[in-house]
Amino acid sequence: MFRSWLKIVDRCESCDLDYRFAAPDDGPAFFSLCLVVPPLALLLVWLQVAFDPPFWVHLVVSLPLLTIGSLLPLRPIKGWLVASQFVNRAQEAGTEKLWAQLHGTTPGTSDFDQ
Ligand SMILES: [Zn+2]
């Protein structure tokens, strides 16, 4: 469902599902930060308290761990959010008319009915 790191294809290659409904916005970043950063931060605080390493150790260990640790789960979380959005037919409340204008559909019909 991805054409690049986080870009979603327009249509599914297998079932021709139109992915225009997919708008997880900053959800993947939010969940990634909430799930990954607290345990990593605890680990890095423990590293500091237990060993009192010089500053460069944090530049070499902590910074890459936090960066890679929060970037790696973005794609699976985005896939999960798009799937949840489809399954739950989620769209922003009160935006049906705007949604229809943006996506060229008639109000009252759903992009999910395809
Ligand atoms: Zn498909």
Image (tube, helix red, strand yellow):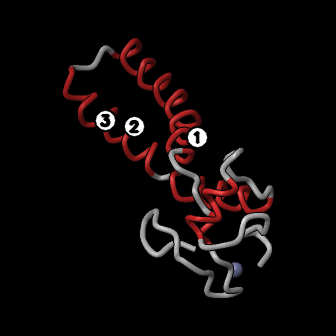
What residue is rendered at 53% in x and 38% in y? 30
- Label 1 element class: helix
- Residue 75 is marked as none
For residue 20, above or below residue 98: below
The amino acid marked with disc number 3 is Leu
Instruction: Identify the residue under disc 3.
Output: 63
- Residue 66 is marked as 2
- Label 3 element class: helix
The front one of 112 and 52 is: 112
List x then y, in percent, for residue 114.
77, 79
The amino acid marked with disc number 2 is Leu
In this picture, residue 66 sits left or right of residue 79: left
Instruction: Identify the residue under disc 1.
Output: 31
How far is the residue under mark 2 from the one under mark 1? 14 Å
In this picture, residue 23 sits left or right of residue 80: left
- Label 2 element class: helix
List x then y, in percent, for residue 60.
25, 37
Given contact means CB atoms under 8 Å apart, are the residues at marks 2 and 3 in contact?
yes
For residue 76, above or below residue 41: below
* Residues packed near mark 2 inside 10 Å, few (<14), some (14 to 19) or many (20 plus): some
What residue is rendered at 59% in x and 81% in y? 11
